[in-house]
Image (cartoon, rainbow, N blue to C red):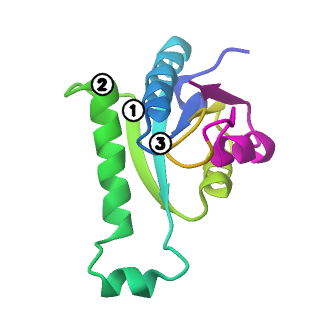
Amino acid sequence: MSETTSQVRIVVGVDGSNASVNALKEGARLAAELGGTMEAVAVWELPTKHASYAALGIGSFEEGAGKVLSDALFQAFGEEVPASVSARLIQGPAAASLASISEGARMLVVGRRGHGGLMGLLLGSVSAAVVNQAPVPVLVVQ
């Protein structure tokens, strides 16, 4: 059975780390080889005590996630983001949100480790959780 462009979708989780920029490049390569599209997704959530952040004058978390996403796309592709690449912001817990948005995709691509965590870990907390939660195959990129 052959696949049409509308059937092949690669989802890439973006957190701004070097690994997620590499995931964007790999996701776009795979989407192009499969004749499909790639959706770059950044997830954000309000901190537990977000009122204290607001009191300190710290700006919008959604706006910050949008900047991380646009910067990562620029780092991966420069001024020429492929037409097959779309970007999306989602509010919620990172791993669960990425697993949910990947429903029906061919694959979910994430970076091995983001900005947080302990240096000795092979997988970051989000990439490890996504491997266990995603309803599709997960590719973890360095």
Q: Are marks 3 and 1 in contact (CB under 8 Å)?
A: no
- Mark found first going from the N terminus, 2 or 3: 3
Magenta stretch: give its range.
Answer: 119-142
The residue beneath circle 3 is 14
Marks 2/1 in contact by CB < 8 Å: the verdict is yes
**Kind of element beneath mark 1:** strand
Front in this rendered view, residue 24 or 111: 111
Q: Which residue is mark 2?
A: 77
Mark 2 lies on a secondary structure that is: helix
Q: Is residue 12 above or below residue 96?
A: above
Neighbor class of circle 3 (other Cα within 10 Å; few <14, some 14-19, many 20+) is many
Q: How many marks?
A: 3
Of the 4 image quadrants, the one containing the C terminus is: top right
Q: Amino acid at mark 2?
A: Phe
Where residue 82 appears, x then y in whole percent?
Answer: 32, 25
Q: Compare marks 3 and 1 and give the one earlier in the sequence.
A: 3
Q: Mark 2 or 1, which is nearer the eye?
A: 2
Q: Earlier in the sequence, mark 2 or mark 1?
A: 2
Distance from label 3 to label 1 (Cα)?
A: 13 Å
Q: CA distance from mark 2 to mark 3?
A: 14 Å
Q: Residues within 10 Å of mark 2 (few under 14, many from 20)?
A: some
Is 124 colored magenta in this rendering?
yes
**101 vs 23, nearest the viewer:** 23
In magenta segment, residue 61: no
